[in-house]
Image (tube, helix red, strand yellow):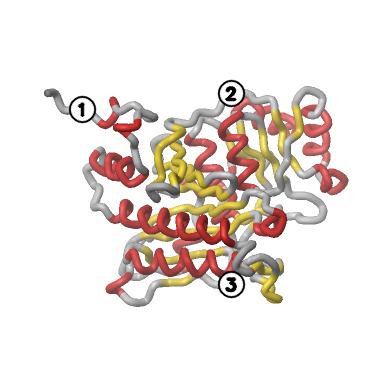
Amino acid sequence: MPETKFDEIKVGRGEDLVTLTRWVLAQQQHCEEATGDLTLLLTAIQFGCKFVASKVKQAGLINLLGLTGAANVQGEDVKKLDVLANDIFRNALIASGKAAILVSEEDENAMVIQDKNFRGKYIITFDPLDGSSNIDCGVSIGTIFGIFKVADPENPTEKDLLRSGRELIAAGYCMYGSYCEMILSVGNGVNGFTLDPAIGEFIMTHPDIKLPPRGKIYSVNEGNYKHFDEPSKKYVDAVKQKYSARYVGSMVSDIHRTLLYGGIFGYPADAKSKRGKLRILYEVFPMAFLIEQAGGKASTGTMNALDIIPEHIHDRSGIWLGSKEDVEELESFYKQ
């Protein structure tokens, strides 16, 4: 009987379910330089996602909703579930032994792993619970992450973090809603995996996600319209004449819909947030990486989002991303 190649396996057949772990191992086999380190790191991330997913479902029952009474480094009120999610991911990533530096939205400073016995060669930037302002009302929230390599594993420093998004080697997000789904890219396309709670595994359900050249949906917080610059105002005025508006207010949810249906998502810099609102290292870069890997485009309006070089670990930027032709149309308003 001839050996079945991985690429020939049909997703959806019960006897040939492709789990996230199996898929990652298959990617490793195609890379001559693979050591298994990234596989172990991604295993730690998916464990963290499963753990957080279970806590999100229990949140209303075990007093994890509401505020802690503290604010994070961004000046935002910290939710109880934010703190728990941050601890879960930080502990899982350190225990993997493959992390060199961790950057979290919830921590003011980057964490450099000092113990060489537990230090790896990767930088993980993550927002442990994006959209957490929506936790108490049950709107879908998620975890966003990006992975870089350190220049020198023997001497990792915060200087390793101030680099363009072109140097990302992997990125993804996990969405916690009516179902739990992980979207992941290791630089060769984008795939989606849905958590089957019966077996505790992520199963491939959205192989090789591709954005259409154009969509029919625009997603932007029009409550900030009066603060937009003129190109953004003119674009929104034009796009609303032909597209439907859909805006959740949770970046993971809005990007997930954009990836699956096409269209454009925007959170531009404005008079109120002159550098933009979204954080470059753990929101803008990972999402821009995924969108480009799916055939779309990510832009600030004047430059490609992955070409930004942050000035500090919590630096912010405006962003427009989605179907390639839609984003190029947005850019044309800035060129005018």
**Relative horizontal placement of residue 234, taking residue 38 as reference (left or right):** right
Of labels 1 and 2, earlier in sequence is 1
Q: Which mark is residue 4?
A: 1
Farthest-out residue, right = 226
Residue 326 or 162: which is nearer the viewer? 326
Image spot of residue 29 (x, y percent): 23, 41
Q: Which mark is residue 108?
A: 3
Q: Is residue 23 above or below residue 96?
A: above
Circle 1: residue type: Thr
Q: Which mark is residue 242?
A: none
Mark 2, other Cα within 10 Å: few <14 / some 14–19 / many ≥20: some
**Relative horizontal placement of residue 92, taking residue 133 as reference (left or right):** left
Element marked by disc 2: loop
* In front: label 1 or label 2: 1
Q: Check contact, mark 1 vs mark 2: CB within 8 A.
A: no
Residue marked by disc 2: 213
Mark 3, other Cα within 10 Å: few <14 / some 14–19 / many ≥20: few
* In front: label 3 or label 1: 1
Residue 17 or 322: which is nearer the viewer? 17
Element marked by disc 1: loop
Mark 1, other Cα within 10 Å: few <14 / some 14–19 / many ≥20: few
Q: Is residue 28 above or below residue 151?
A: above
Of labels 2 and 3, earlier in sequence is 3
Circle 3: residue type: Glu
Q: CA distance from mark 3 to mark 1?
A: 49 Å
